[in-house]
Image (cartoon, helix red, strand yellow):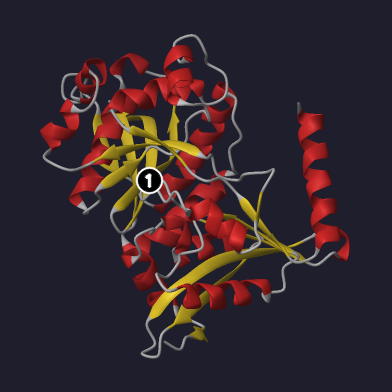
Amino acid sequence: MPYLLLTPTADQWDTFVRAHPDAHALQLSAWGVHQSRFGWQPRRIAVADSAGRIVAGAQILLRRLPLGLGRRAYAPAAPLFSEDEAANALLWRALRACGAAFIKFEPCDWYRPRPDLPDRLLQADLRPSPQTVQIPRTLVLDLSGTEEDILKRMNQSTRYKCRLGQKKAVVVRQGDSADALRFGALMQLTAQRDGFRAYPPEYYQSAYDAFAPSGEVVLLIAAHDGHDLAGAMIFRCGENAYYFYGASSDAERNRMPTYILQWEAIRWAKAHGAQRYDLWGIPDADEATLEAEFERREDGLWGVYKFKRGFGGAVRRSVGAWDLINKRAIYALYTWAIQRRSRNKA
């Protein structure tokens, strides 16, 4: 079958992404709009069949390199492959011609594991990257069955805490754009307390505003007696929902607002057709190590793993990041700079 390159509209692209077996919110046009406010230039590269239907593609984010060295690109949760290798071959050719010195891909295979994926990436002349952007390991909840079925898959302590809303007088409401900015400020405080890096408050408001028109985001806020205690920003795409961002204050922690909030987020995801709920990020260790060490460790993501594991999800690991290199000297210089920066932070 003949294939051609297509410059899709946002609606055309999003229709393709949502229906793809590896659909992910980070490939929706709204994510590109959001990132365009922070120095990235989104570009959607699509391969269509003779009827104009998109069958393969990737949304990439382009950014200028320093010293006039050209541009680099990043493609989260991409490429989205076709079943026909001829279409995929055209996609790779178009990606090589996009004008970037190199492109970092992080294919999504958390929800549909594909053991052949590394071999396919190697055959396309990609190499495993020394640097990942997204956390490679996560917990994915199964949302099949009734709400009671979902609760039964949690451990007893987590299930009990999720049901405490009325007893603890915690009320969960849906926020708006103004709330998203305040949520961003709470993210800053949470990051300082728990030792991770947060974006400026405007970043979270931008993400909310980009996805709000399609209804593929919700900001949930848990409050007691008129005071906000915790918030969670949840995104969705196709059959998947994602807990990208969560923040909490130090007040009233005995009321378990984060558990009550998480249960309402799960209920929202299921009500909107999600089959899975991605808790988004745990330590990159095998299951045996996770279970052996979570009770004694609080560094990095270990503290959040202790919280997330109680919801009964399955541990999943992606294939990580892979680099498509067009200009080897520039790529080598960039990789050296990244590794040097990492050593200086250590």
Question: Relative to 57, is 148 on the left or the right?
Answer: left
Q: Position of residue 183 (x, y in %)?
A: 45, 40
Dot 1 corresponds to which residue? 242
Residue sitting at 39 percent across and 87 percent down?
Answer: 52
Question: Relative to 215, is 98 on the left or the right?
Answer: right
Q: Is residue 75 visible?
A: no
Q: Going by the picture, which residue comes out furthest to the right?
A: 67
Residue sitting at 51 percent across and 63 percent down?
Answer: 79
Q: Is residue 130 visible?
A: yes
Query: Is residue 300 or residue 286 the one in the foreground?
Result: 286
**Amino acid carrying mark 1 in the image:** Tyr
Q: Position of residue 237 (x, y in %)?
A: 34, 57
Question: Relative to 110, is 319 on the left or the right?
Answer: right
- Above/below status of 168 relative to 278: above
- Residue 23 location, quadrant: bottom left
Q: Position of residue 181 (x, y in %)?
A: 48, 46
Residue sitting at 13 percent across and 41 percent down?
Answer: 145
Q: Position of residue 282 (x, y in %)?
A: 47, 30
